[in-house]
Each structure stands twice: as C-alpha cells, then as structure tokens.
Image: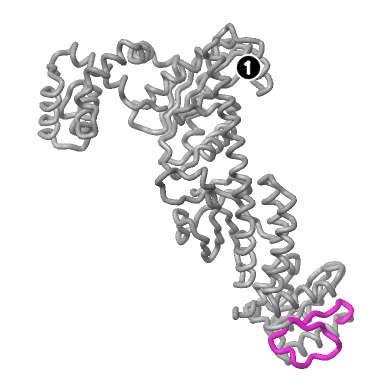
Amino acid sequence: MTAPPKVSDLLADPLLRDARTLAGHAGLERPVTDVTPYRGTLTAVVGHLVLCDARDTTPAYRLDALVRRAQEAGAAALCVTAAATARPPLSAVRLADRLRIPVLWAATDDPLRLALDLTLRVRAPEVVRARTVETLVRRLGTRTEGPDLLAAARGVLAADISLVTSDGSAILGDPVPWDGTLRPELAVPQRTARLLAHPVHDSPAGQRSGAAPVPAAWLVWPYQRADEDRADTVALGLAVLEPFVRSWLATARTRADHDSAARRRLLEEVVGSRATVSREVVERAVALGWRLEDWHVGLRIHCETAAADRPDTVGAQLGAALARHGVAAHAVAERDGGWALWTSSVRQPAPDEARLLLREVRRALAELPRRWRPVAGIGWPHQGPGGLADTLTEARNAARLAGVREFRPSVELTDELGVARLLATWQQSDITQAFAETALAPLRDADHAHLLTTLRVFLENGGSSTATARALGLHRNTVTARLRQVRDRLGVDLDDPGHRLALQMACRAVQPAPE
C-alpha cells in the first residue's frame, strides 16, 4: 500500500491545479488520509482534508472559528470552495499561519464533483488510475498522428509529456535535459526525482541487424513534484501511449522512406538529364515545390552518426537546426547516408549571400551533437536544372575537402577553394581513382590500415616525420618504422616529390569521403 499523499502533493495534482494556498504554508507536508465535506461539525477528521463552502466562512469570524476547530480536530488542511476567487480576512490568515494548518482556496463551479474526485484520489487511487487509463485508451483510439496522440495524452493525464530523442532533443513537445541519474541507453522505464521516462521501442523492421535494442525515442514527463500514486498513474499512461506512438513512428518512417526514395530518384533524374528534363520530371518537381528554373545554391552535409542514431531523426534535427538559422532548403537523403540540399531563389544571389549562407550553416551545424562531427560543402549559384546539377556537384567536392579538416564542424564554400577545386576535380577523375586503387592496394586491408593512415598524414604534413608523429600522437621512431614498411610494400621512393604528389592524390581519392 502506498503512503498517503501530502497536502503539497494534492496541490500538485490536476484536481487542485488552480487552488491557492492562502495560509498555513508550514503545514503543507501533512499527510492526507481522507476527504471530508464540512457539515457543521468536525468530528473524526484526524488527517482529513476538510472541504467547506464559501458560505461557511462568512462573515469573517466564522472562518476564524472554522480554522481553529479544524486544527483542534486534527484536520490536515482546510479547503474553501467558491465559484470565484476571493481573499479571506487577514485575521484568519494570521491564525492559520500561527496554527500551521493550511488554508486552500479552490475556485470551482461544481464543489460536489471536486469533493468526489478528491475523495477517490485519496481513498482509491487505483480507481482513478483505471478510469484515467480507460479514458486515455478511448481518446487514443481515434487518433493516428503523433501531435494528436501527444495532445490527447497531455489532456487526459494533465501532464506536459514530450517525445524526445536519446539526447533529449524534442520530436514532439519540448526538449528535456536529462538529469544525471537517468540512463537513456537502457531501454527500460525509468523514474528519477524530477523525471519520468518511458522508452518507445523500435519496430522489428527498424532495428539494425545484430545491434543491441535501442529506443527509437522516449516519452518523458518532467515534473516538480508528484506523489507515488500520481507518478504511477502517469507512468501507466505512458506505457499505454507507447504502442500508439510506436505505430505512428513506424508509419511515419515508412512514409518518409518512401517519400525519400521518390525524392532521391527524382533528383537523380534531374541531375542526369540536366537542361533536358522531361515534362513529367518538371511536373513531379513542381508537386514537391521544386522550382527547377530558379537560381540554386547546393549544399552537401554529412554526419558521422552511430548505430543508435536513426537517419530520420538525424535528418529532422538537421533540418530544424538549419531552419532556426533561416536556411530554408530542399533536402534529399542520399544512398550513402548524407544529405543533398539546395536553396532556390528567383533572382541571382549576390556574392555576399553565399558567405552569409556559409556562416549560418556553420552555426546550424554547431548546434548538432558533437559526436556527429558534421561536415558540409556549399556550391556556387547556378540557374536552371543543369545549374542545380552543377551546384550540387560543387557542394559535394567542397564537402570532400571539408572532411579532410581536423576540426568539426567543417564547412567549405566552393568559391573560396581556389586550387583545392582543381585538386578535387583531379582526385575524382576515373584515372586518379583507378591509379589510387592499384597503387594503394597493399595498404588497404584491415591489417595495414595504420600504415595507410600514417602515409596520408605524412603526405598532408609536407613529408615531415616530426609533424606526422605529433599529429598521430606517436614517437618519431614509430613513424619512421611505419614509413619504412610503406616503402617496402608500395615499392616507391617517398623522398621523390613526384611520387609524394601522386600518392597524396591517391590517398585523397580513396579516403572515405564525407558521404
């Protein structure tokens, strides 16, 4: 059997959400064992919340007497119900403060209903819980969309519930900072002193093969105060809500995957056709809000997400971060896990607008989780369907070069790359790719990956063994020994500038790009 609620617990309950504590704050921690309506006498009311009508407290001396009698009878608190909010006389307030008995003032048009609800809340919380669940199931059964489901649960449970990701970012509702005692990596319901969290389990189709179960999201209720019965009711409500939200997420994910695949195919057709897109392609693009004839600025963004990060959630957070900084872009998830994005405008963007976009993209990416290590490339403005293909290609090249940078987030604008643009073109050519695959083959297996890394860092640091050792955190002798192995396996002279340049281009060509 759970402990009886305290007066302060009832004040935190939705039933007395609008009630005010007018006096006797020192007694708010008194336990309430029952609820008794005042009928002219106060007997056997030890530990009870006494409900009285405003007429029982006027004139002023009657409230003074009622406060004194309630204290003498051992009542936990006195609650005055009235149709409108009023102020009790000062003498009664001072008396209640002195006697340390709480005096509550609850504005209600139906005092009998309030008395019945409070009685059930104190005497039979399990009945309240059952009724709440029944009402919640009925409300949820008529809703299919996430916002509607959350709104229904918030209304029935009278709790500010949010649907958040594993790092507390909001999917629906408000973001919720995790407290230090909650462990979001565990897919089990959890309760802390200020937080109630229930995992939304992933559907079998959405689970990664061989991966440990990871919640797709969390239903969370942050609260200031809640007694055990109230917390149990909300916890049960979250458990009831979870399968409905899971179904919505699965449906939304399927719909998003279908839409994403359709967008990706359409973009591939636009890029492949360039200026000769068919009428059907144009019509499909217009249906998606793509104005192919406009001026376009391409973006390419990639994040190093982990197995626990769902692509749809990552995309939603990325889009929200860009939107917060005024970047309204069309986005298409690509097959390699990155995103192709572009902004469109009727007029040709001014040169300073590209640099403004660069600054805003950097700010947006800085808001993403640091573990994602985002990189981005931005193309130059081009017009028409062929221009969209050109600017997206430029953005991809810029993103490749941004991925070479050691810091994150890294964002490059293609117009500012200079010689790097030429190098990007070279390293992506078929000839360079073929040379790289052949020349570096002896180092591309798992057992020699450390040698390939050492070679790449050595070449990027101008052929300096000292700088390479510093960058890799190794002793210079270790680097020297590794370079000797590289020479032996590749059969090249690393002191030859021509060989170093060719190998550097090859390393860049085979290096995992930000894709």
Q: Position of residue 162 (x, y in %)?
A: 61, 52
Q: Amino acid at mark 1?
A: Ser
Q: Does the magenta portion include 72? A: no
Does residue 26 appear in this view?
no
Query: Extreme top residue here?
Result: 276
Asked if 455 appears above or below 493 in the picture, the reply is below
What segment is highlighted magenta in the picture?
A: 35-56
| Viewer-proximal residue among 178 and 20 | 178
| Horizontal arrangement in the rendering, residue 78 relative to residue 322 (left or right) | right
Asked if 156 appears above or below 398 in the picture, the reply is below
Q: Does the magenta portion include 37? A: yes
Q: Position of residue 78 (x, y in %)?
A: 75, 80
User: Which quadrant of the figure contains the N terminus?
Assistant: bottom right
Q: Identify which residue is drawn at 68% across, 46% down.
A: 147
Q: Identify which residue is drawn at 64% across, 20% down.
A: 290
Residue 135, quarter of picture:
bottom right
Q: Position of residue 304 (x, y in %)?
A: 41, 36
User: Which quadrant of the figure contains the C terminus?
Assistant: top left
Residue 83, quarter of picture:
bottom right
Q: Position of residue 496 (x, y in %)?
A: 14, 13
Mark 1 burial class by Cα count in 10 Å: few <14, some 14-19, many 20+: some
| Horizontal arrangement in the rendering, residue 140 relative to residue 431 (left or right) | right
Asked if 350 appears above or below 51 in the picture, the reply is above
Asked if 200 appears above or below 258 in the picture, the reply is below
The residue to which callout 1 is attached is 345
Does residue 415 appear in this view?
yes
Q: Identify which residue is drawn at 31% across, 10% down.
A: 431
| Viewer-proximal residue among 506 and 438 | 438
| Horizontal arrangement in the rendering, residue 504 relative to residue 413 (left or right) | left
Secondary structure beneath label 1 = strand
| Viewer-proximal residue among 442 and 301 | 442
